[in-house]
Image (cartoon, rainbow, N blue to C red):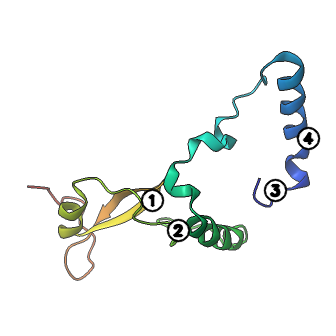
């Protein structure tokens, strides 16, 4: 539950009780289901680094394009080198690197970059 502690206790207790009594909870628990993670996210290094970073994120002010620094480049598509070559700025989602936006050389934003 990563530092949500007592704030999540009521909902967790309700879901577990429903699961025991009824055989399934009344709400979708996929967002907190451990099976949503891949093998790359189950390494000691990934967990150590990401947990250290995650605790600090609880108190940061969010801003656009804010991306995590740890646990990167676990999964890259075959297009990754081509995207990188045309100025992709990458983000990460469940271990996958994805192009968030493109910049021309020199760092200028370019929303019309085409892959050839």
> Residue at left 20%, top 73%?
104
Circle number at residue 10: 4
> Residue at left 85%, top 16%?
22
Indicate whether 47 appears above or below 9: below
Disc 1: which residue:
92
User: Which residue extends farthest bottom?
Assistant: 106
Residue 61 at x, y percent in the picture: 65, 71
Disc 3: which residue:
4
Location of the C terminus (image quadrant): bottom left
Indicate whether 81 appears above or below 94: below
Give the spatial CA distance, label 1 vs label 4.
31 Å
- Mark 4 or mark 2, which has the lower sequence index? 4
Q: Is residue 49 left or right of residue 56?
A: left
- Mark 2 or mark 3, which has the lower sequence index? 3
- Mark 1 or mark 2, which has the lower sequence index? 2
Give the spatial CA distance, label 3 vs label 1.
23 Å
Give the spatial CA distance, label 2 vs label 3.
19 Å
- Mark 3 or mark 1, which has the lower sequence index? 3
> Residue at left 66%, top 69%?
57
Residue 73 at x, y percent in the picture: 39, 64
Give the spatial CA distance, label 4 vs label 2.
30 Å
Q: In this view, does 21 lie to the left or right of 47?
A: right
Res 19 → quadrant = top right
Disc 2: which residue:
68
Is disc 1 placed on a helix, strand or loop? Answer: strand
- Mark 1 or mark 4, which has the lower sequence index? 4
> Residue at left 22%, top 61%?
83
Residue 78 at x, y percent in the picture: 23, 53
Q: Which of 103 and 24 is in front in this view?
A: 24
């Amino acid at each position: 539950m990563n530092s949500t502690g007592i704030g999540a206790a009521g909902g967790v207790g309700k879901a577990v009780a429903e699961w025991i009594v009824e055989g399934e909870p009344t709400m979708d628990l996929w967002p907190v289901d451990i099976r949503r993670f891949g093998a790359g996210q189950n390494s000691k290094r990934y967990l150590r680094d990401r947990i250290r970073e995650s605790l600090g994120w609880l108190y940061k002010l969010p801003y656009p394009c804010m991306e995590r620094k740890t646990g990167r480049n676990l999964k890259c598509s075959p297009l990754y080198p081509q995207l990188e070559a045309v100025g992709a700025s990458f983000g990460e989602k469940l271990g996958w690197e994805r192009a968030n936006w493109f910049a021309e050389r020199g760092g200028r934003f370019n929303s019309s970059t085409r892959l050839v």
